[in-house]
Amino acid sequence: MTKIGLEIHCQLTKLESKLFCSCKANYREFEPNHNICPVCMGLPGSLPRLNQKAVESATSIALALTCDTPEKIAFFRKNYFYPDLPKNFQITQLNVYGDMSVGGEGYVRVEDKNIKIRRIQLEEDPGRIIYEGASERTKITLVDYNRAGTPLVEIVTDPDFESPRQVRVFLNILSDLLENLGVAEPGLEGAMRADGNVSIEGGNKVEIKNIGSFHDLEKALHFEITRQQSLFERDIEIAQETRHWDDRRKITVSSRSKEEDQDYRYFLENDIPWVKIDQSTRDRLKENMPESISSKKERYVEKFDIAPQVADIIASDRYYSKLFESAYSDHNAKDIANLITTDVIGFIDTKEKQENSKITSEHLSELIDAINSKTITRNSAKVALQEIMKSGKNTKDVLNEMDLGQVSDSSEIDTIISQIFEDEKQAVIDAKERPETVNFLVGKVMQKTKGKADPVKTLELIKSKLNQ
Amino acid sequence: MNLNTSILKYIEDVKSGTFTVEEFTTETLQRIKDVDSDVHAYLSLNDSAINDAKLIDQKISSGEKIGQCYGFPISIKDNICITGTKTTCASKILENFIAPYTATVINRLQNEDVVITGKTNLDEFAMGLTTEFSAFGPTKNPWNLDYVPGGSSGGSAASVAANECLASLGSDTGGSVRNPASFCSVVGLKPTYGLISRYGLISYANSIEQIGPMTKTVKDSAFLLNVIAGQDANDDTTIDNNNVDYLENIEDGIEGKKIGIIKEMTTSEGLSQEVSTATKDAICDFESLGASCEDVTLPTIPYTVAAYYTITSTEAGSNLARYDNIRYGYELESEGYEYNSYISKSRAKFGPEVTRRIILGGFVPSAGHAGKYFLKALKVKSKLISEINKAFEKFDYLISPTAPVQPFKFGEKIDDPVTLMLLDYNTVTANLTGKPAISVPYRVINGLPIGMQIMANSLKEKSLFQSAYALESKTNLPEVPL
C-alpha cells in the first residue's frame, strides 16, 4: 500500500507585517533587500516582537482544520547555518515537549476519507537565495532578505494519502479553505509550498524536498512511487532518506547532505514569552470565521436547488462566492449562480482579473432580471458582462450603448429570416429534409442580430416558415 | 573640581551653578586622558561629548525643559548599541560593526540629558570574569593596576571607580555587573528579569541577562533605575513596573526585616578568609540596623554553576551563530570555499573563551546529549526557582558576599577555566531565578575591595535599595588611590 504524507507551508500574506517586525508581509513588490530592518536582518542587539495578529491567523487555520488548540503556545529556535537565515536559526514551534504549537490533531475531509492533520505551527520564512545558473555550479549566490521573517504556517499531515490524485484534491480543498479564511493567498507565487513523503508496502519513508509547485509535487510523487515500486519488485531495500526533486530532469535525487542527520538543537526562544490563547479569543476567532466552503455549498444546494457542481465552484472561490452572496435574492439565486459559472468565470479566471473586475452584484441581478424579462438574450448578457467587467458602467447604459436589447418583435425577426432563407438556399433544403440541421439557420439569425434575437421565438418562426 | 562625586550631588551642583556641564565634562575627559592609558576602561570615546554638554548648558541657561540627568557623564558597556558608533563586544568579529540603531536604555538616558563619555571594555561578548578575554586587551583594577577589575563589565566598573565618569551601564548574565562592582568597589545592580529593556543589548544568554546600572552610591543606582526601567514595545520580555519611584523612601531602613544568610554561599570551599570575615561583619551590621539574620539553605545551589554554563553556552551558541562573517566580520576571501567550510574558517577569530562556550553550546543541547545536560540544567533552574520562592516566603532578603574572593592578579586564573567559573558561584542564582540582586561596596582590605550581595524577590527593587542603602551607611571606605 502506498502511503503519502505532506508538509505544507503557507505564507500569511493577508497580514500587514512580518512575524517579528513591522516590515511588510507582502514583500513581493520591493526591490531586493528593501523590505528589511534590524530585527528581520537579525542584527546584533535586535529582538523579535511577536505579531499577535499572526498568532490569531494561525489559530484560525487550526480551528478551521478542526485542530485542538492549546491554551498557551511557545516558540523554539531551530539552529542551523544557511545563508538565507539572517540569525542562523529559525524561530519556529515544536511539540516534542508537549503541545505548544498553534494546533494539532485535526482533519480534512477529502472525498470519503479523513486526512489527519498532525500539527500546525507558526514560523518565520527565510530569505530567498538566487543562484546564478545551475545551483551546483554557481559562482555567485545572491540573497534577498525581503522574505525573511514573513509569517509562515506549516501544516503537517499524517501519511494518509493513497495516491497523488488524492493529494491534489486535498491541496485544492486546503488552498480554497485558506483563501476562504481570508488569511492567505495561495495563488501568489511561492505563497503555498508543499513537500511530500512516500512509503510503499510498509517500507521506509522517503522525504521529497525542493518542490516548486503543486503540479511538480504530483509529478514527484508519481516518480517516487514508481521508483520505489521497481526497487521493491527487485527485492532491493528502499533506503530511508531525503531526496530532492530535480525539476530539470523530472526525477528525485538522493540528497548528498544528510539532512535527516542534521541536529537542530531545538530550545525555547526566550525572547518571546509564552502566548496565552484563552477561550474568549478562540470563541471570537470562531465567531469571526467566514462560513466554511462545505457549509456554503450545502446551503446553496439545499436552499436554492443549485446543482452540486455549480455550488461547489462558487463556494470554493472567495471572489465568486462573495459576488454570489451579495447578488442573489431568493427568486433568482439559481440563475445568478448559473450566470457566474457559465459566463463570469470565463472572463474572470485569474486573481488579477478578479482584482481588476468592475462587476458588482447589482450588475448580475440586473442582467438576470433583463434575461428573465426577455429584454436581452443570454448571449447579449455575456457580451454585456465583458464590457461591464472593463468599464463598470451601469447595466442599462451598457445595454443601450451596445444595442443589446432583445429583438422579440416577430415581424422584425421574420424579415431577417426571409433574408436568410434567400441567402442560404441549400441550408433551407437541408433543414427541410433533416430537421436537426435547423440550428444552422437559427445561428445565422443570431449572427445577423448579434445575438439579440429571442432564440425561442426565432426557432418557432423558422420552423413555421420551413413548413410553409 | 571633585570628580569623585555622586550623580545626585552633581545635579545639585549644576543646578546651583557650582560648575557647568561643560566644565565637568571637560574635567572628566581630562581625567580619562590622564588615567585611561593605565586603566584601559574605555574602548572608544564619544567625540561629541563636549558638544553634547554645551547643548545641555544652553538648555539650562535658556530655561528650556531639561532632562533629570543634567548632563552627568556616563559610560556604556560596549555590547549596547548606539546609532552610528562602534559596538564591538570586545570581539574581532564586531571590530568594525557600527550599530544602525540605538538601544532603548540609551534612548531613555538621552531623553533625560546625559552626556555619554564612551564605550567600555568587557570580556569578549560578555563571557568572562576578569576582562582578560577582551580582544583589545584587559582593563586594570583602579585600586591596584596589577589586579583584575572583575568582569565581564570590568571596563564599566573601572571607569566609575577611577572617576572617569559618574556611572555606567553594564550587563549581567551570571554576575557581570555585580562581580566587577565588587572588585572595583562600586554599586552594581542586576534587576529583575524583564525590568529593563534588552533591545539593543547584544545577546549572550538572553533568557537570564539584564542591563544594570553601576554607580558610586546606592541612591545613584536607584536614580538611574528610575530613568531606564519599564516596559518597552521593542522587547516582549519587559514587564510593567507601574512607574515605581525607587528613590522614594530609600532611607526607610530595614528595622524588623528578615534576612536569610545563604549557607551554601557563605561556607563554600572557595571562600577566602578576608571575604568570610567581612561577611560576618556585614551580618552584624544588618542586625545592628534592626534586621534579624538567620541561616537559610538552598540545596540546589551547588549545581547552579554547572547549570548556568550549560544554559548560557546553549544560548550563546545560538545567539552568536549570526556572526558568520558574511554580513559583518573581517576580511576573509570567500572564493573557493564551500559554504560550510567557509563558516568554520570564518568563525576562527573568536577568542578562546567564546570558542569554548560555542563548542560547549553545540554539544550540551544536541540530540542524544540534551537529556543528560541541557534538559537537566533546566530542571536545576526550575528547582532553584521553587527553592528561592519558598525562601522569600520567609525572608525579605537573602545575603552573601558577591564574590567568594577578592580581586586577583592578571594571569593568575586565566588558564584555569573551572576555577574562573566558580567565581560565579554566588551570583548566578539571581540570573537563573530572575530575581534582583545588588552588590554593595563593603570593605577594602589590603587595598582591595570586597562587596556584599543582597537579593530580593522579583520586582522588589525598592525594598532592595532600602537594605543596600542601610548597609552602605554603615561603611566608611577609602578613596581610590589613583
Image (tube, coloured by chain):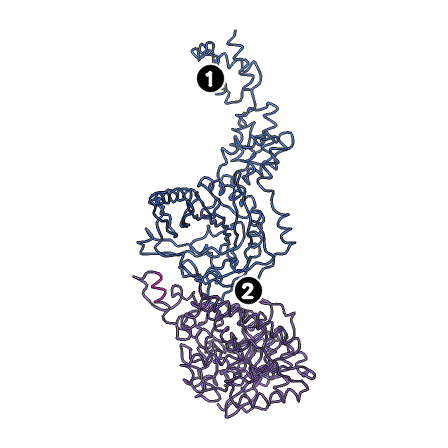
Chain colours: A blue, B purple
Q: Secondary structure at mark 2?
A: loop
Q: Tell me the subunit letter for badge 1.
A: A
Look at label 1 and name its amino acid.
Answer: Phe
The outermost residue toward the top is: A468
Q: Which residues are magenta?
A: B339-345
The picture places residue B387, in percent across and down from the top left corner, at 60, 74
Q: Could you tell me if residue A259 is visible in this image?
A: yes
Q: Which residue is mark 2?
A: B234
Residue B444 to residue B360: above or below: below
- The residue located at (58%, 47%) in the rendering is A66
- The residue located at (58%, 16%) in the rendering is A409
The picture places residue B432, in percent across and down from the top left corner, at 55, 73
Q: Quadrant of residue A425?
A: top left
The disc at residue A440 is: 1
Residues packed near mark 2 inside 10 Å, few (<14), some (14 to 19) or many (20 plus): many
Residue B146 to residue A97: above or below: below
Check whether the beta carbons of the residues at disc 2 and disc 1 lie within 8 A of each other: no
The disc at residue A431 is: none
